[in-house]
Amino acid sequence: MLTDYRLYKEDVAYTAALELPWEKLQDQVFMISGASGLLASFLIDVLMEKNRTEQLNCRLIALVRDEEKAKKRFAAYLEDPCFSIHACDINRRETLPEEKQVDYILHAASNTHPVAYATDPIGTVTTNIIGTDNLLNFAAEHGCRRFAFASSNEIYGENRGDAELFDEKYCGYIDSNTMRAGYPESKRCGEALCQAYIRQKGLDCVIPRFTRSYGPSMLMSDTKAISQFIRKGIAGEDIVLKSAGTQYYSYTYVSDAVAGFLTVLLKGECGEAYNIADVRSDIMLKDLAAEIAEIAGKQVIFEIPDAVEQAGYSTATKARLDGTKLQKLGWNARYSMREGLERTITTLREMAE
């Protein structure tokens, strides 16, 4: 299991030891959608570590689509009374858990990679709108203390050429009349729904905006460029670059991303959005490919993407986020891009042996 590997255990222990107001989660019920995903699964490992080491007694409800996959991922917790798996379709309200009280909700379920955008554009949109509305309504009806909507750097759209870094007020161009727009536009709508529930239902909501995240908890089915590069690296193959590689993006290692999320959840202000980003991990795609190739002892080669891949690619050429607002709450990324990549590749190689 992933939780057995040294570097991953170090990351979980480090995140669980952060100086945060953890007492807010003492004896609380925390429901997490998309629980098997890269970020949510790491968060669950952190909270279960906190339960184990400091008796936080935070009961976790993991909402998943594939129960068998979730049981394998969270095998270490299946007998723990603080953990449960609930298989459901969040787009169908009647499938959500029957709970009297849920104190915290993280909505992290979403298609998050190019092939999924291209092959399931309807599901991409509905999960971010209908699913979000269902969970917000559930939160309002179940006395939820705080709802967190996992948003994305993609909501910023194209850089208009007037900003080097996107702060939380930036709004760039998105051509809404395309299939690929389904993801960023529905994330924007999800954020708007949070604001509507704050005003109309008095719900407490925060909006962490994640950058392109990576780490050893990544899903092998993920088709984002960084995930493809990493898979090639751990397989001992050359890194395949499917463009000129001049796209300039922000990235975040999973433990830093979840540390940022916990800072937003426990210290952020209701209604506010926060970029989880550190400029040390801003990098051009061609340089990212070269870094991974160097770590793996391979080289970078160019390949034309197929039509399905191309349809799901972002057209944004520069999307660097300003993390100043979150840093003012006390968050700072621990790892540089190089360090995060080395930890990811080392752990995934060990798991593949």
Image (cartoon, rainbow, N blue to C red):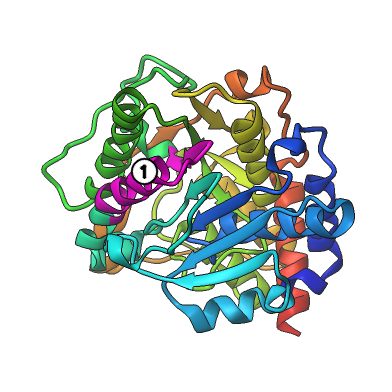
141 falls in the magenta region: yes
Q: Residue at x 29, y 65 (%)?
A: 94
Judging by the rendered image, the residue that carries numbered circle 1 is 136
Q: Residue at x 32, y 53 (%)?
A: 313
The picture places residue 78, in percent across and down from the top left corner, at 67, 77
The picture places residue 308, in percent across and down from the top left corner, at 26, 67
The foreground one among 171 and 52 is 52
The number of numbered discs placed on residues in the rendered structure image is 1
Q: In the figure, is residue 182 to the left or right of 329? A: left
Type of amino acid at the residue the image marks with label 1: Leu
15 falls in the magenta region: no
Magenta residues span 127-152
- Residue 68 visible in the snapshot: yes
Q: Which of the 4 image quarters holds residue 259? A: top right
Q: In the figure, is residue 76 to the left or right of 137? A: right
Q: Which of the 4 image quarters holds residue 10? A: bottom right
The picture places residue 111, in percent across and down from the top left corner, at 37, 59
Q: Residue at x 52, y 27 (%)?
A: 274
The picture places residue 48, in percent across and down from the top left corner, at 74, 60
